[in-house]
Image (cartoon, helix red, strand yellow):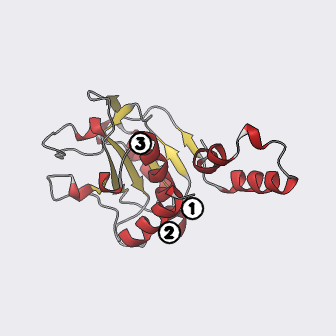
Amino acid sequence: MNFFLELFYKKYVDPVLYPLPIEYWVYFNNALASFPTIECLQGFSQSSRRTKKIQLIVLHHSGSLNFNKALIWFKNPNSFSSVHYLIDLDGHIQQLVPDENASLHVTSGIYKFSRLVNEMSIGISLIGNGFDRFTEAQYEAVAMLCAYLKKKYGLKNEDIFKHSEIECKPMATDPHPWSKEKFNELLDKFENL
């Protein structure tokens, strides 16, 4: 899936507008090539959603700066953890669990008096060790992904949480150091394309 296609192209390029000037097609093709795409891998820990409605997004960090190590961790069934999306340092987004299934990213969280947080949420993990700052590409990718998921599932900004805001245990893997202002600014930008 390409975010430019989902957030902008389908919205503004209507069959009524054909034929468009060649400059528009050059712009569209360049944008399609430069916006991040999502690749889907199979075989990560998941379960069915008991409640079919996605009500929130939970943001995490992976605990490592190595994308391949994070993939190995999430692929290991003994880790009892997974996320829907993993975002690399360069902004590359890898989907590990389809949205229609629940990933195992919150072990003992509560949301709206329910412990079925995994069944109600989408989990997104950014590659990060908890000390180094996230890259601009990661901020842009997570903002685009959240803008897309908000639109798709009818969510609001208040429905996006850091792990510690949901988790009951003190060992939550929040995205850290996290700039909420930068994230919200980019989120608004991509929602208003």
Callout 1 amino acid: Asp
> Which residue lies at the image location 20% right of the left edge and 58% below the top edge?
171
Quadrant showing the N terminus: top right
Q: Quadrant of residue 153?
A: top left
Location of residue 137 with respect to 124 vertically, above or below: below
Query: Is any part of residue 59 visible from this angle?
Result: yes
Task: Judge left or right: residue 136 versus residue 167.
Answer: right
Dot 2 lies on which element? Answer: loop
Assign a secondary structure to mark 1: loop
Q: What is the crowding at mark 3: few (fewer than 14 residues within 10 Å), some, or many (at least 20)?
A: many
**What residue is pinned by disc 1?**
90
Read off the residue under disc 3. 84
Locate residue 163 relative to residue 133 in the image: left or right.
left
Crowding at label 2, few (<14), some or many (≥20) Cα neighbours within 10 Å? some
Q: CA distance from mark 3 to mark 2?
A: 20 Å
The residues bearing labels 2 and 1 have C-alpha atoms spaced at a distance of 7 Å
Q: CA distance from mark 1 to mark 3?
A: 18 Å
Name which residue lies at 30% across and 56% down. Answer: 158
The spot of residue 150 in percent (x, y) is 42, 47
Q: Along the polypeptide, which appears first: circle 2 or circle 1?
A: 1
Foreground pick, 111 / 105 = 111
Q: Amino acid under label 2?
A: Thr
Residue pictured at 75% horizontal, 39% vertical: 16
Residue beneath the point at 74% across and 37% down = 15
Amino acid of disc 3: His
Q: Position of residue 127 (x, y in %)?
A: 44, 59
The answer to whether marks 2 and 1 mark residues whose Cβ atoms lie closer than 8 Å is yes
Label pair 3/2, CB-CB below 8 angstroms: no
- Relative vertical location of residue 104 with respect to residue 100 in this rendering, above or below: below
Q: Quadrant of the C terminus?
A: bottom right
Query: In the rendered image, which residue does mark 2 sit on?
Result: 135
